[in-house]
């Protein structure tokens, strides 16, 4: 079986996630921020790496579904705890609506995306999973965002994404749509070309650069 070597702090965080020890996980996250006060790095280097490893352990039957749910719930809880540290007073008067593709149940990555926008002074509306496209359309009419950010984790939802994009383009031809999520690492060039005019991101670092470019031109 494949062995993954993680840096000690990440291994410690992961072990505590698997044990369901939220208090320790929370204090490890804070210790990390004392050494490196970058929430984005914490998300990418600690939370994402740990959850990907949780996924691998789950896929190879080394942990149960219950343990995987516990690990995800603890991580989401810590994202919420850190929210106060994320919000900035330097607002840029821009709005982003952040949602998942219909039928997609993975919401941790897209929650991080909402947080990066908040850190950059944007107002974010995080809708999470389970939002029917018709309701999303209504919400966009109400909020009039500058950007819509969509996440797709499981490749079998790709057809739903295409359908969703078609509906959204009919309603909002000028709306800037950005997308991301691990489903795209499995997508062929041909599938990607069917997405049309969207901007695709693999991680929070590239997203941050993109937002900074927009902010610099305001
Ligand atoms: C937790 C989890 C679940 C939970 C989710 C709960 C929740 N509240 O989110 C539950 C139990 C619901 C779940 C269900 C399933 N899951 Co699951 N799950 C996971 C797990 C362990 C962690 C997901 C996670 O949070 N990752 C951490 C985040 C931070 O990473 P991320 O999503 O990639 O996001 C990053 C980037 O992609 C990017 N990003 C993401 N979206 C966007 C959007 C934009 C706009 C931008 C800019 C960037 C961006 O930003 C983030 C930071 O870099 C993963 C393992 C893994 N490798 O991730 C499997 C995994 C995603 N699941 C998988 C599968 C197969 C399933 C199920 C089909 C299982 C089943 N048989 O029922 C169902 C699918 C249900 C559905 N319809 O969606 C597979 C997906 C394979 C694939 N790509 O097709 C994975 C990879 C596990 C595996 N190794 O097989 N799962």
Image (spheres, rainbow, N blue to C red):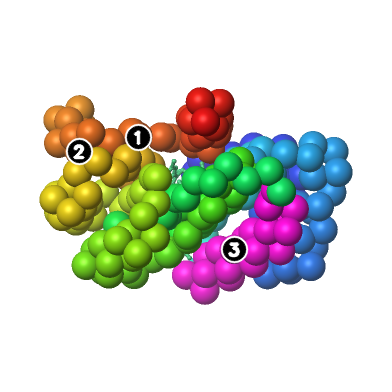
Give whichever of discs 1 and 3 has the lower sequence position.
Answer: 3
Q: Position of residue 131 (x, y in %)?
A: 32, 68
Residue 204 in percent (x, y) is at 53, 38
User: Mark 1 packing: few (<14 Cα in 10 Å), some, or many (20+)?
Assistant: some
> Which sits earlier in the primary sequence, circle 2 or circle 3?
3
> Distance of mark 2 from mark 3, alpha carbons?
29 Å
Residue 153 visible (yes or no): no
- Few, some or many residues within 10 Å of mark 2 (<14, 14–19, 20+): some
Q: Position of residue 16 (x, y in %)?
A: 72, 61
User: Rounded to the nearest whole Å, what is the CA distance between mark 1 and mark 3?
Assistant: 24 Å
Magenta part, dominant SS: helix
Q: Are marks 1 and 2 in contact (CB under 8 Å)?
A: yes
- Crowding around mark 3 (Cα neighbors within 10 Å: few <14, some 14 to 19, many 20+) is some
> Considering the numbered disc 2 on the image, is that residue within a helix, a strand or a loop?
loop
- Let me know if residue 1 appears in the view: yes
Sequence-wise, the earlier of marks 1 and 2 is 2
Farthest residue toward the bottom?
66
The residue where tag 2 is placed is 195
Q: Residue at x 51, y 26 (%)?
A: 217
Q: Can you identify the residue that label 3 sits on? A: 76
Tell whether label 3 touches label 1 (CB within 8 Å): no
Of circles 2 and 3, which is in front? 2
Image point (52%, 31%), residue name: 218
Which residue has dot 1 on it?
Answer: 200
Residue in front for this viewpoint, 5 or 70: 70
Q: Which residues are magenta?
A: 65-88
Q: Please, is residue 40 above or below residue 145 in the view?
A: above
Q: Nearer the viewer, residue 8 or 187?
A: 187
Residue that appears at 40% across and 45% down: 146
């Amino acid at each position: 079986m494949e062995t993954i070597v993680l840096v000690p702090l990440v291994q410690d965080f992961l072990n505590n996630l698997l044990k369901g020890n939220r208090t320790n996980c929370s204090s490890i996250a804070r210790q990390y921020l004392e050494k490196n006060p970058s929430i984005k790095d914490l998300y990418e280097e600690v939370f994402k790496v740990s959850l990907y490893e949780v996924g691998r352990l789950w896929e190879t039957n080394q942990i149960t579904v219950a343990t995987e749910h516990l690990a995800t719930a603890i991580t989401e809880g810590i994202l919420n705890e850190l929210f106060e540290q994320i919000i900035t007073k330097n607002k840029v008067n821009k709005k982003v609506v952040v949602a998942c593709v219909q039928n997609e149940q993975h919401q941790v990555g897209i929650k991080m995306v909402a947080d990066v926008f908040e850190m950059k002074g944007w107002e974010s509306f995080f809708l999470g999973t389970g939002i029917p496209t018709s309701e999303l359309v209504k919400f966009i009419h109400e909020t009039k965002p500058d950007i819509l950010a969509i996440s797709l984790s499981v490749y079998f939802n790709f057809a739903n994404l295409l359908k969703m994009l078609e509906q959204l383009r009919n309603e909002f031809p000028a709306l800037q749509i950005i997308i991301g999520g691990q489903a795209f690492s499995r997508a062929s060039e041909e599938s990607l070309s069917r997405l049309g005019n969207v901007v695709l991101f693999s991680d929070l670092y590239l997203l941050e650069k993109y937002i900074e470019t927009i902010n610099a031109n305001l």
